[in-house]
Image (cartoon, helix red, strand yellow):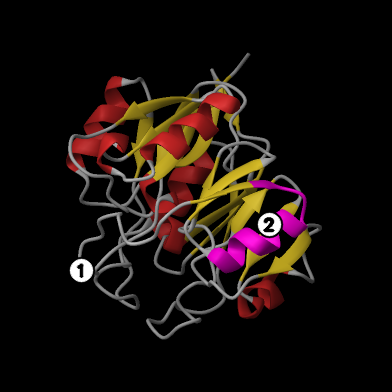
Amino acid sequence: MARVINHANLPSAPVKLCAIGAGNAETKISLQRLGISVIEPKPSDGLSFAEKTHSDMLMLHLGRNEIILSKEQEDLKKQLEAFGFTPKMLKFHLRSEYPLNVTLNAAIIKDKFFAHKASIKYYSGDYEFNFYAVKQGYAKCSCCIINDNAVITEDEGISLVMKKAGLDVLKIKKGEIKLRGMSYGFFGGATGKLSSNILAINGELRYNSDKKNISAFLKNYQIDVISLKSGPPEDIGGIIPLLEEEK
């Protein structure tokens, strides 16, 4: 039996269903071997090549059964409804122009909602979060959410805002995460939680020059790491946990 995850990005038990971007066969197989079912949003023709398959650009889990999808996701909507979610669709098509492309790319940490100010306008009237505006529109991509108190990010602006919000933030070097179609991606887009104490990385941490600092930070929070593929970490739009094992 499985249940919806209460707080977005923060499973409290082993994950049973997650979303990843289409076209990542090795990662998908690794997750399935761990007993995790995988769903893949439909790529968006409105987004750039580097972003069009990324799940963190195409869907936003708000927590519990609430989830928002890009307008292309009619099939995904039906799948999620079968799992007990009540998905809502964006009222407009995503476009490649920034920040119109990042409406769904918000970093939600329990009651805190970090996003570009243009994105916050879309949510602030309907949802009861504490909203924090950040200059970095790719807020979710930029954040590896460890727990409800700890985050790893390459972005200086996000780091400062999150620290002011009371979070423990490890700032790492940017430019070391692979991203197809771009010169580099983000650590948050290469990671996702698979249980309360397991962080999955789409690649191997040993290739990152900040590996010692990252390992020490994770150890401090008693987080173990699972590599889903060989080679340097690659940004695929994150691994979004949706259902967890019923306790």
Specify the segment rendered in magenta.
156-168
The answer to whether 92 is drawn above or below residue 126 in the figure is below
Q: Is residue 164 magenta?
A: yes
Quarter assignment of residue 107? bottom right
The answer to whether 168 is drawn above or below residue 189 in the figure is above
Determine the secondary structure under disc 2. helix
Give the percent coordinates (x, y) of residue 188.
44, 50
Residue bearing the label numbered 1: 181
Q: Nearer the viewer, mark 1 or mark 2?
A: 2
Quarter assignment of residue 178? bottom left
**Amino acid residing under circle 2:** Met
**Amino acid residing under circle 1:** Gly
Left or right, 123 with respect to 209, comes to right
The answer to whether 215 is drawn above or below residue 19 in the figure is above
Nearest to N terminus: mark 1 or mark 2: 2
> In the depicted view, which residue is nearer to us: 171 or 6?
171
Within 10 angstroms of label 2, few (less than 14), some, or many (20 or more) residues? many
Give the percent coordinates (x, y) of residue 22.
26, 52
Left or right, 220 with respect to 233, comes to right
Q: CA distance from mark 1 to mark 2?
A: 29 Å
Give the percent coordinates (x, y) of residue 231.
18, 40
Residue 196, visible in the rendered structure: no
Residue at x 68%, y 39% (from the top left corner): 148
Determine the secondary structure under disc 1. loop
Q: Quadrant of the C terminus?
A: top right
Give the percent coordinates (x, y) of residue 63.
66, 45
Residue bearing the label numbered 2: 162
Residue at x 54%, y 17% (from the top left corner): 1
> In the depicted view, which residue is nearer to us: 98 or 55?
98
